[in-house]
Image: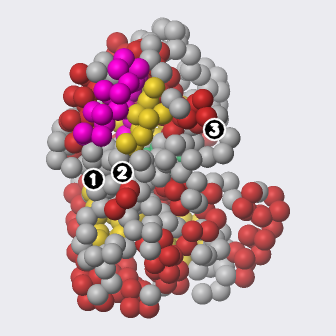
């Protein structure tokens, strides 16, 4: 594949942006590649500025569940564009999106719209601290919740990929407020609660982890976390920025029948436009200004164009058979990847929840990844070679072992078939 235009664009971009990018994972460093620059998206495909076409499993890191350029979403945005881009006054559209969220996500009675997932988790922490009068937070190793100071401690995803699970620039006094334990490990969490009685405001977690690759919660784990929080007077925060409207209309909390105190959303609820949200019971949300003492605000919060894209997206998701279709496609991809591993003898494990899927390069065939330490150090290099071999075959995977691949509703059975064929060849090659 020719990459001249992307290579030249990257050289120029590096003079302007750190690493040539506006979010580190996009630089593709951990997979030993240079990025290709996107020109446009068409359904399940992205086309780069050299004219190469790729089947897209990045999906903008989650939002593009309907694929690129879905007509209803673009029409809704166009209709709003002619009315105005931003007002600093409330609009009815915001309530329409809010109502769709409240209808779908069991634990949310009221919510606040913000502009990114990072803002959602940051605000959720402030709410939890304001409501409990406590300051410490428990987060889980390998979960990523955006670049909030308190949450850049043993973080997953891009931070992990760069070998920076802990960021420079986070004051040690701030990092000390964050306690960390492993995912799927209730005894370790209980131990933290016992060691810090009356100090812990909240536990925040990804109810299905996407940011260390896909790691599902074990049976009873999420219920155990919620019950433990209740017992110790802390609040449970489910960060569903990735899983909300992805693993089902009601997010992971519906899929696993569990109700957290606070839920964070982002990505899909903006249909590809910048957005975030956090919500809880009506009573807990009364803690937020102007009703209550916890301040939180934003010039771009509830931006009408983002909200219009979000409404169109959630409306399609609510009425159709999208999730059954995604389950079917996900199952086919999972089966095909497992066969490819078996046929080539490359040791690996495929983990999937709905349309989120990861192929982990493990040391033993089929060894489960239950928490971060189950991903061997060798996986990164292996995944890098696999990523490059797949990209050369027109398959765009997220550029890290620690990311979920996203299937969209624009993907077809034939698309999935092409990925399985490519994966078999790529596994042979590496
Ligand atoms: N939480 C989770 C679970 C995420 O996956 C992400 C982003 N990948 C965030 C929070 C942060 O969202 P944003 O990048 O919109 O700030």
**Residue 209: mark in rendering:** 2
The yes-or-no answer for disc 2 within 8 Å of ligand 1 is no
Tell me where the magenta segment starts and ends, as one range: 186-205
Name the disc covering residue 216, or none. 1
Quick check: 398 above or below 284? below
Marks 3 and 1: which is nearer the front?
A: 3
Instruction: Determine which quarter of the picture holds residue 134.
Output: top left
Q: Residue at label 3?
A: 170
Drawn side of residue 117 relative to residue 349, left or right: right
The quadrant of the rendering that contains the C terminus is bottom left
Quadrant location of the N terminus in the rendered image: bottom right
Where 126 sits versus 148, above or below? above
Tell me the SS state at disc 2.
loop
Distance from the alpha carbon under mark 2 to that under mark 1:
6 Å
- Mark-to-mark CA distance, 2 and 3: 24 Å
Element carrying mark 3:
loop
Q: Nearer the viewer, residue 280 or 133?
A: 133
Task: Name which of mark 2 and mark 3 comes first in the sequence.
Answer: 3
Query: In percent of the image, x 39 and y 68: which residue is there?
Result: 376
Q: Secondary structure at mark 1?
A: loop
Is the residue under label 1 in contact with that under label 2 (CB below 8 Å)?
yes
| Residue 338 percent across, percent down from the top left | 25, 77
Q: Is residue 93 magenta?
A: no
Whether residue 374 can be seen here: yes
Between the C-alphas of marks 3 and 1, the distance is 29 Å
Q: In the image, residue 110 lies at what x, y percent?
A: 37, 21
């Amino acid at each position: 594949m020719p990459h001249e235009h992307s290579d030249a664009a990257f050289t120029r971009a590096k003079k302007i942006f750190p690493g040539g990018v506006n979010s580190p994972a996009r630089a593709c460093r951990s997979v030993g590649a240079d990025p290709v620059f996107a020109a446009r998206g068409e359904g399940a495909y992205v086309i780069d500025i050299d004219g190469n076409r790729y089947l897209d499993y990045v999906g903008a890191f989650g939002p593009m569940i309907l694929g690129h350029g879905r007509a209803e979403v673009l029409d809704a945005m166009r209709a709003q564009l002619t009315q105005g881009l931003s007002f600093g006054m409330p609009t009815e559209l915001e309530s329409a999106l809010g109502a769709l969220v409240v209808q779908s996500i069991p634990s949310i009675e009221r919510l606040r719209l913000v502009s990114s997932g990072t803002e959602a988790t940051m605000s959720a922490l402030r709410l939890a601290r304001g409501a409990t009068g406590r300051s410490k937070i428990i987060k889980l190793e390998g979960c990523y919740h955006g670049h909030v100071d308190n949450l850049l401690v043993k973080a997953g995803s891009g931070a992990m990929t760069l070998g920076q699970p802990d960021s420079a620039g986070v004051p040690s006094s701030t990092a000390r407020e964050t306690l960390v334990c492993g995912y799927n490990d209730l005894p370790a969490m209980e131990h933290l609660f016992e060691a810090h009685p009356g100090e812990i405001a909240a536990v925040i977690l990804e109810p299905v982890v996407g940011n260390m690759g896909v790691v599902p919660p074990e049976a009873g784990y999420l219920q155990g976390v919620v019950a433990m929080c209740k017992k110790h007077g802390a609040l449970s925060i489910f960060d569903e920025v990735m899983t909300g409207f992805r693993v089902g209309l009601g997010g992971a909390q519906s899929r696993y029948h569990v109700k957290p105190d606070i839920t964070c959303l982002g990505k899909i609820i903006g249909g590809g436009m910048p957005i975030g949200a956090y919500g809880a019971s009506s009573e807990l949300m009364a803690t937020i200004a102007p009703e209550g003492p916890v301040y939180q605000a934003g010039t771009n919060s509830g931006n009408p164009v983002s909200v219009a894209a979000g409404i169109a997206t959630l409306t399609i998701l609510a009425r159709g058979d999208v999730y059954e279709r995604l389950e079917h496609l996900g199952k086919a991809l999972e089966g095909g990847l497992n066969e490819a591993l078996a046929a080539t003898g490359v040791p690996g494990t495929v983990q999937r929840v709905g349309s989120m899927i990861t192929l982990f390069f493990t040391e033993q065939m089929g060894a489960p990844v239950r928490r971060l330490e189950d991903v061997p150090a060798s996986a990164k290099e292996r995944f890098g070679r696999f990523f490059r071999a797949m990209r050369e075959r027109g398959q765009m995977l997220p550029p890290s072992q620690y990311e979920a691949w996203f299937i969209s509703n624009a993907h077809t059975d034939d698309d999935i078939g092409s990925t399985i064929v490519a994966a078999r060849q790529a596994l042979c090659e590496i």
